[in-house]
Amino acid sequence: MSKHKCKAVILKKVVIVTGGSRGIGAATSKLLASKGYAVCVNFIHNESRAEELVTEIREQGGTAISVRADVSVESDVKSLFEIACNKLGAVTHLVNNAGILFTQSALVDIEFDRFEKVMKSNVASCFLCSKAFIKQAQDGGAIVNVSSAASRTGAPFEYVDYAASKGAMDSLTKGLSLELASRNIRVNGVRPGCIYTEMHADGGEPGRVDRLASQLPLQRGGTPEEVANSIAWLLSDEASYVTGSFVDIAGGR
């Protein structure tokens, strides 16, 4: 297997968080920085928001950079890993969090172009970043893929395309965990449910979590920080015997 040309010696924990400038990604970036990780905050559109997050992390004594990259494009992913390696060191951990969601629709009303965009953004990005990570990995490491409870429910009449992309991510997580176990690279997933993030506005219903909260066993929506806590645990040595597993963060649903 060809190796990425990162020559940095592993002296610290370095993590790339894709889609790291908002929502679950931002909460994860901040939490990991507070735990001593050097964090590469990946973003694609909102540079000012990514820079604000990096500044906040640095002001609190952490180490962080922001890197613009479309992680569904292979050349961008290669550049992302090269920059992270050159500025922070060899990448030891990866959070595949980038993803998109479109307006709630029944499958029959979803255009194929939208379906392709969702699969590319949500699945191809996970594939490409995982591949790049593996090529430069040295001694062990960990990947956490941010899936969704939609992979279990199917999200009927809302976004079956998004649910299908997360189901594909779950399969990738399981298969890759078995391929990499002998190299001590752990691969796990988290499946958030109704979490207070801006993604619901992307789906056309900003108040979706409040609408559904009473239907959940815990009677409330979740926070990005609650998801970040599970991601941080799966990346950590406390989860050293956990691979190919999924943590459902969905209020009991």
Image (cartoon, rainbow, N blue to C red):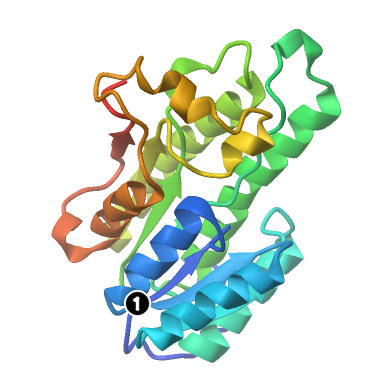
Q: Is residue 210 visible?
A: yes
Residues 78 and 37: in front is 37
Q: Is residue 81 visible?
A: no
Q: Quadrant of residue 156?
A: top right
Please state if 243 lies on the left or on the right of 162 as rendered: left
x and y percent of residue 99 in the render?
61, 45
Residues 197 and 137: in front is 197
Q: Quadrant of residue 106?
A: top right
Q: Is residue 241 above or below residue 87?
A: above
x and y percent of residue 146 in the render?
45, 45
Q: Is residue 26 above or below residue 247?
A: below
Please state if 190 lies on the left or on the right of 85 as rendered: left
Total marks shown come to 1
Residue that appears at 47% across and 64% down:
134
Which quarter of the image is occupied by the C terminus? top left
x and y percent of residue 15 in the render?
43, 71
Q: Quadrant of residue 162?
A: top right
Residue that appears at 68% across and 75% down:
79
Residue that appears at 71% across and 32% down:
102
Q: Secondary structure at mark 1?
A: loop
Residues 207 and 157: in front is 207
Residues 223 and 144: in front is 223
Dot 1 corresponds to which residue?
A: 37
Q: Is residue 18 above or below residue 57?
A: above
x and y percent of residue 175 in the render?
42, 39
Say which amino acid is labelled 1.
Tyr
Please state if 219 lies on the left or on the right of 46 as rendered: left
Residue that appears at 28% across and 50% down:
230
Please state if 140 lies on the left or on the right of 84 as rendered: left
